[in-house]
Image (cartoon, rainbow, N blue to C red):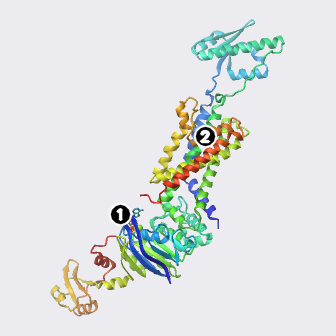
Amino acid sequence: MTAIEVRDLVKRYGELAAVDGVSFDVAKGEFFGILGPNGAGKTTALEMIEGLRQPDSGSIRLLGEPVWPRNAALLPKMGVQLQTSAFFERLTAREQIRTFAALYGVAERAADAWLERVGLTEKAATRTEQLSGGQAQRLAIACALVHEPEVVFLDEPTASLDPQARRNLWDLLSGINDSGRTVVLTTHYMDEAEALCDRVAIMDRGQILKLDSPSGLVRDLEAPVRITVAPGGVSLGEAAEIAGVDHAVEDETGLVLSTRHPAGVLTELAERGGLDGLQVKAATLEDVFLDITGREYRA
Amino acid sequence: MSSPFAAVALAITRGFLRDRTALFFAIVFPLMFLVLFGGILTDRGQPQVEMITVGDIAIFEQLPPGAKAAFDDAFDVRPLGDLDAAIAEVRDGDADVAVVMEGRELVAHYTQTDQVKAAMTQGALAAFVNGANLAAAGAPPVVELRIEAVEDDSLETIQFVTPGLLGWAVAMSAAFGAAANLQGWRQSKLLRRLQLAPVAPGTIVGARVVVTVLISLAQMAIFLGLATGAFGLQLSGWWWLGIPLLVAGTLSFMALGLLSGALAKTQEGAVNMANFLVLPMAFLSGSFFPLDGAPQWLQMVSQALPLRHLNDAMLDVLVRGQGPEAIWIPLAILLGFAVVVTALAARLFRWDGE
Ligand SMILES: Nc1ncnc2c1ncn2[C@@H]1O[C@H](COP(=O)(O)OP(=O)(O)OP(=O)(O)O)[C@@H](O)[C@H]1O
Ligand SMILES: [Mg+2]
């Protein structure tokens, strides 16, 4: 079953095509990511799918229904966390989520349960302005989910968080589609897309460049695996001779070998006793981005 | 579980009550002016004549009760034993007049330095002496004078300033609240977020309007309570007609706030613009001092301002004792202003800051 169907979506701001012919489907229960650098058009695309912005052209169906103009039947079925934390001023965390709950006709008990689920019970009486970035994001996510929507849109939920807080949030996020909920998330963190998403659309300059599962994207790239070992184990010349090594260099960290057949190379290295300080680094989505755009990925 | 309307209204109310700046400008700041105008400057209307009496002055003591009250209003009397000392005080300006009975003559020693007071003293004393003579002769007065106030000048300062300052206070908080809300909620994307909740826009707008109106009524209660309780404001029997007036006024000031919010790009900008509209409007509408002395063209300009109509009508019903006939036209003007300016704001509103 498809939850979201997007066809040839276009949105222009003057000369700029913020979203330039985007099409994709999201299956029910899928965790779908839109990955791209700043200004790629992620928010614009997402807000059109949510029904907040009118597309210049193209069609969108959410749970089989059109989203524009404002479709009141869809609103209770979708949960939205906008890129900025959209809160009422000077309310505590508990008052905030209870207000949102009331907007959806949800009982206060359910609101409090969500507060607990995102780990904010201790902060319930704190004003939202005084929450840390990560806590505010948790609250925004809880507010988006308080009415148990079928489809959830999260726009850069981990933006501006430190690495620790991001990883904490991942635990929460990876749980929210357990119950068969569809999740669409935008991010400009490659590792986040890899860790959370079933499928990822890589977006740049208003267009989707590639769409696949994170592992599929990397596999397609056929990028070499980088193997690093400590210096002194095997010599550079010796290493370059090993079958399957495409390329070998020596730098201050040690010997770096590129290969598309890591298993064989590792066996050879092991036989020569050269595995000290071993590091194996597979290609990442960053390499995928570099490959398709010719540009270094800069979040 | 509360209704969406109640939940939003509660959220806005909490936001307001926890906003110290908003509270200060809505309540404390205008009250400071009320205390200043009403409490400190209140006795300037009629200067009393300071009188020193030397020895017993029978005619003053035998005044009939009505005349006695008038006498006490006009003169601040203190006795002194010695005539020369009393005259010296008058000469030094420490008193305005020294009076003494010499046989059947009432002799008043005064100085011409302050001509107004000198004239008042002469006139008042002559009137009291004549009155005393008539009373002594036992003849009923042929003509009696009754004085009734008709002019605004006769209003005590507090009577005049309370309606105007209340109007200004309400204008400030309604306009600032609407401006800050519209811009703040747009910037934080809360407006967008609320658009995605299954509640009609009318619910949100209605909640905001109801809270603003309640704040205005609270301001009215505090103002009138303090002015009556502490500064002797006398409310007319029709004072409650001020309630519909204030509600209509609040709507038109909210409309001004919405216009500021629609025009400005940031929350600070919106509040500054509201300030820029409200403060001159308050001056031109006679919130701080009467416009009677202002040039004609200024009076004309002020007719375009909602606060002018609110102030005039509030003065009519709160203290001048005018009835329902005084509020229909101002009500219509205020509501019309609210509708037109809100429509303008809606046209100018842009979802995106750019
Ligand atoms: N309301 C608007 N008016 C004009 N241009 C806009 C508007 N909204 C977005 N843009 C432009 O459209 C492009 C895409 O913006 P968008 O916000 O969708 O990017 P994004 O991928 O969400 O970026 P980020 O990662 O920074 O959130 C940008 O170049 C942006 O400047
Ligand atoms: Mg964005």
**Ligand 1 occupies quarter:** bottom left
Q: Quadrant of the C terminus of chain B?
A: bottom left
Q: Is residue A160 visible?
A: no
What is the residue that sits farthest to the front in this orientation? A57
Q: Chain of mark 1?
A: A
Residue depicted at 58% across the width and 32% down the height: B290
Q: Which mark is residue A15?
A: 1
**Place of residue B321 in the rendered image (x, y in percent of width and height, measured from the top left):** 71, 36
Q: CA distance from mark 2 to mark 1?
A: 49 Å
**Place of residue A84 in the rendered image (x, y in percent of width and height, measured from the top left):** 46, 64
What is the residue that sits farthest to the top in this orientation? B103
Given contact means CB atoms under 8 Å apart, are the residues at marks 2 and 1 in contact? no
A10 relative position to B92: left or right:
left
Q: Which mark is residue B309?
A: 2
Q: Is residue B61 visible?
A: yes
User: Any atom of ligand 1 within 8 Å of the CB at mark 2?
Assistant: no
Count how many numbered circles sit on residues in the image. Answer: 2
Mark 1 is surrounded, within 10 Å at the Cα level, by few (under 14), some (14 to 19) or many (20 or more) other residues, namely few
